[in-house]
Image: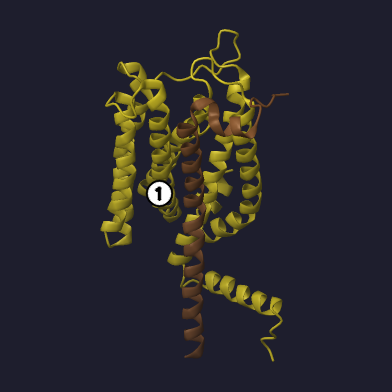
């Protein structure tokens, strides 16, 4: 079983002195995840709304 | 297998299968990424030369893989579009391009941040880095080209041709570390041999994040493709049925009786 390598949370955050390089990469990855998921989910709602609005207009005619 | 692929070529099928696959994909991807990142950040032993800084590898290498993978996917789709005129292939190629571009950016940024303490510089115009930057511009170029051409069919063909031309850069990236003297190291030896520089404790988390990246890629691919399908098929009967039953369902759920 792999062992936890740091003695405290502060030590984990410090990343052996490389905190300013390691953490930004992981933050950027979080942004990458958000980019993959959020914009398409947002446009899905918009597209569905538009098509529904059109269908309703056509129904009423 | 072929029949299955053939069915995926139908937008309606792709849309429905996508909806069925997505929940599983969400779960598996989330699990892989969480396990891989926690393991990689906290549990794998520090490198004897780079200390804890090497932990960037758990995102840098998968990002590089995703850059290559997305471009292969786009190239396959482009070929399918040009040879067999499969419309679905163009939809997928369009969906993958922004994901590939962002993966390349993640690779470049993580590489730079890794380079500062290890190489003493965040950027150098060596073959690996320059060809990777070029790859980013190829992705951006393909996205820009599509939005610059108004006719959808012409845009699809132009992008497919540009993608296949851009394919020439992939082996250059791949072999740059062998063909030229680069500051970037060669491919890592991930074998189980005792002489291997990388013990399993170090690279196992990379497998988790690697497969997590693949999952993330397919989530993005499905979501974006489904959007494009809805847009292109908005006048077809199945989209109407889909959205109208959606409506009815939402109405009954909120307690509104549409027949009243």
Query: What colour is chain B?
Result: yellow
Residue B16, given in percent of the width and then of the height, sits at 59, 59
Q: Residue at x 69, y 84 (%)?
A: B256
- Which residue extends farthest right? A1
**Residue in the foreground of this view, choosing between B43 and B1:** B43
The N terminus of chain A sits in image quarter: top right
Residue B258 in view (yes/no): yes
Query: Please, which chain is the residue tagged with disc 1 on?
Result: B
Q: Residues within 10 Å of mark 1 (few under 14, many from 20)?
A: many
Residue B25 x %, y %: 62, 47
Colour style of the rendered protein structure: by chain
Chain A tint as drawn:
brown
Q: Quadrant of residue B124?
A: top left
* Viewer-side residue, B225 vs B1: B225
Tell me: residue B14, above or below residue B60.
below
Q: Secondary structure at mark 1?
A: helix
User: Residue beneath label 1, please?
Assistant: B98
Rendered residue at 58%/55% (across/down): B18
Question: Which residue corresponds to the image point at 62% horizontal and 74% vertical from the top-left?
Answer: B245
Camera sees residue B184: no
Name the residue located 65 percent from the left edge and 75 percent from the top edge: B250
Would residue A24 be found to the left or right of residue B206 on screen?
A: left
Residue B153 picture location, percent across and down? 32, 58
Query: Residue B15 location in percent, x, y?
Result: 55, 59
């Amino acid at each position: 079983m792999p062992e936890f390598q740091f003695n405290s949370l502060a030590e984990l955050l410090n990343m052996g002195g490389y905190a300013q390089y390691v953490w930004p990469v992981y933050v950027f990855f979080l942004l990458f995840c958000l980019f993959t998921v959020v914009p398409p989910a947002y446009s899905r709602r918009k597209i569905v709304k538009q098509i529904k609005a059109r269908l309703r207009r056509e129904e009423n005619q | 297998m072929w029949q299955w692929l053939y069915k995926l070529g139908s937008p309606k099928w792709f849309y429905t299968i996508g909806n069925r696959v997505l929940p599983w994909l969400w779960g598996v991807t989330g699990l892989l990424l969480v396990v891989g990142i926690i393991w990689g950040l906290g549990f794998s032993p520090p490198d004897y030369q780079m200390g804890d800084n090497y932990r960037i590898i758990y995102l840098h290498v998968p990002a590089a893989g995703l850059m290559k993978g997305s471009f292969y996917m786009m190239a396959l789709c482009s070929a399918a579009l040009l040879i067999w005129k499969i419309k679905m292939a163009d939809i997928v190629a369009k969906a993958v391009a922004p994901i590939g571009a962002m993966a390349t950016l993640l690779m470049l940024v993580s590489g730079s941040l890794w380079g500062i303490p290890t190489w003493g510089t965040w950027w150098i115009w060596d073959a690996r880095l320059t060809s990777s930057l070029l790859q980013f511009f190829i992705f951006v170029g393909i996205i820009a080209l599509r939005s610059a051409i108004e006719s959808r069919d012409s845009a699809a063909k132009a992008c497919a041709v540009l993608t296949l031309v851009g394919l020439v850069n992939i082996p250059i990236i791949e072999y740059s570390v062998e063909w030229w003297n680069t500051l970037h190291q060669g491919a890592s030896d991930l074998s189980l041999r005792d002489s291997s520089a990388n013990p399993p404790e170090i690279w196992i988390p990379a497998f988790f994040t690697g497969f997590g990246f693949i999952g993330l890629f397919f989530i993005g691919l499905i979501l974006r493709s489904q959007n494009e399908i809805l847009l292109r098929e908005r006048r077809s009967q199945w989209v109407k049925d889909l959205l109208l039953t959606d409506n009815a369902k939402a109405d009954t759920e909120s307690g509104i009786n549409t027949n009243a």
